[in-house]
Image (tube, rainbow, N blue to C red):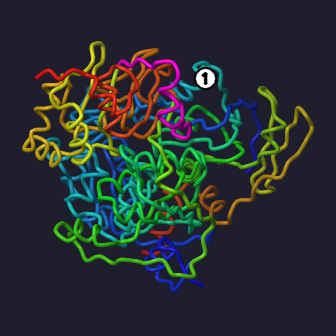
Amino acid sequence: MGMTMAEKILAAHSGRAGVEPGELINVKVDLVMANDVTAPIAIQNFRRLGVSRVFDPERVCLVPSHFAPNKDIRSAEQMKVMREFAREQGCVYYEQGQAGIEHILLPYRGHVVPGDVYVGADSHTCTSGALGAFATGMGSTDIAVAMATGEIWMKVPETLRVIYHGKMGRWVRSKDLILHTIGQIGTDGATYCAMQFEGEALAEMSIDARFTITNMVAEAGGKTGLMRVDQTTLEYVRPRARRRWTAYEPDPDARYWQTIELDASAIDITVAMPYSPGNTRPLKELLGGPELPIDQVFIGSCTNARIEDLREAAEIMRGRRVAQWVRCIVIPATQDIYLQALREGLIEVFTEAGCAVSTSTCGPCLGGYMGVLAEGERCVSTSNRNFPGRMGHPKAESYLVNPPVAAASALLGRLAHPDEVASVAATR
Amino acid sequence: MAFRGTAHKFGAHVDTDQIIPARYLNMSDPQELAAHVMEDADATFAGRVQAGDIVVADVNFGCGSSREHAPISIKAAGVSCIVAKSFARIFFRNSINLGLPVVECPEAVEATDEGDTLQVDLSAGTVTNMTKERSFTAKPYEPFMLELLDAGGLVEYTKRRLQAASR
């Protein structure tokens, strides 16, 4: 019987001709990752294993991202554990000032390539699936074992195929497609599944936009999200890849647990309301209701802080000012993107508009620092989660949106549509 | 392996931010984490939970981030096992890897109220509500998962495997 993309990659990495959903297999991994929050526990467990060296230092990446630059003494201690281990083992390590959010950094720097099995101690590791890799998040103990042995146990997942037909409407972005999808299937709709994304809307999408979709597979409970390798993928991968890659195609007779077909042209700008990424509404329905004044806008995170996202937000903000009583925080995902945004004049646009622009960090997305919310505060955010307490106080509220909506909301001081920006007077 | 304890009931989709908020992720000591367990779901839980108690929850328990701090904090608080209608994938994996039994049994969750006494028998695959005198069959574990739990988690299991391979 034919195999899905996920099944093909797992078969190739477990030395089998074929695998079937539900089978427990031992898988060889191509890349292992941990960050400053998850690495210390992984390192502790690595030591307990009684192993002295990681299986391959060039395939173990440690990235300071969550509380980087160090937010307090305790996080500094965690950071220290990680960097000392990286030095001792000769692992791939990006220092603060050269790093950024791992899910953007590692594919951008060519550490992840199509056909990889990539395991990371962070739930959003699935982001790299947009390159046609089996990328999945795990806990620190799994990562300790993967670092030591280069292998990990896995249950072969069922595959949930999602097909986006048609073309997206004006101001509708990949973020809206995935938010809409999670709203449809629920935050446990893809639990234990590999998602496989296809369709006309994807074919026309940039790599930046594709990463946003696979990133939020985690919010549907999925194990990984895969996209086929096409010309767009190859243009991204070719100049960066540090290893040979393999493009795995799903077989025409592959068996899918479910296939969901959606018409991208019928999907509106979508907002995930508190307190779940699955609590979605079309923006237009919310704009018809009572006004939702906001205290903060966050443009950042592994979901939407790539150069394309920043360009779009800056285009809306150019020559205008952030509304009074709103703080707008903009955080490019990596140092590479920060530099590019600087060269393109985007940082200047944000700064003139009255945004706080920071060096790369996960920071506010998880209520870590650099923009934590107080009780009762309301935030519009381009990030991926809005559970109680996610971005600060358990009674703060976050609304998840695409970057143009976030930028428009910052200017209008409430949840807003990008077309409404014309009503905001330009400052020059 | 069998456990008996008092049930503490939680709702659906309790995510890892509620189990152990990110403001405590700058630490990794199990006892320190246990002091804040479930804080954003029920701030009184850490003060009430007794050794051996059982967490009972609705669907998708442990969704959200991959932070192992979540099952670590629950285990360190003395919780003997978790019974839920369903678990999020990474949380399930992390718990088994740590040697914290997690049991899927929707009927037992439906039939259990806060404060009931539960008995969970992993080998028999049953959850018994002693207060209500009703017994339920849990979703069976794969033999490999039982092996992991028996070994005390993934680290011990892998250690044995590595030692056996080097002999």
Left or right: where A109 falls relative to B114: left
Residue located 18% across and 36% down the image: A359
User: Which stretch did the figure color magenta?
Assistant: A275-295
Percent x, y for residue B57? 69, 37
Residue located 58% across and 26% down the image: B41
Percent x, y for residue A314? 20, 36
- Label count reads 1
Left or right: where A163 falls relative to A1: left
Magenta stretch holds residue A292: yes
Magenta stretch holds residue A42: no
Quarter of the image with the C terminus of chain A is top left
Q: Is residue A234 above or below residue A314?
A: below
Q: Outermost residue toward the right?
A: B133
Chain assignment, label 1: B
Percent x, y for residue A229? 35, 72
| Picture quadrant where residue A38 is located | top left
Q: Is residue A211 above or below residue B53?
A: below
**Residue kind at label 1, given as amino acid type:** Asp
Whether residue B152 appears in this view of the structure is no
Choose between B133 and B12: the one closer to the eye: B12
Left or right: where A108 falls relative to B121: left
Mark 1 residue crowding within 10 angstroms, few (<14) / some (14–19) / many (20+): few
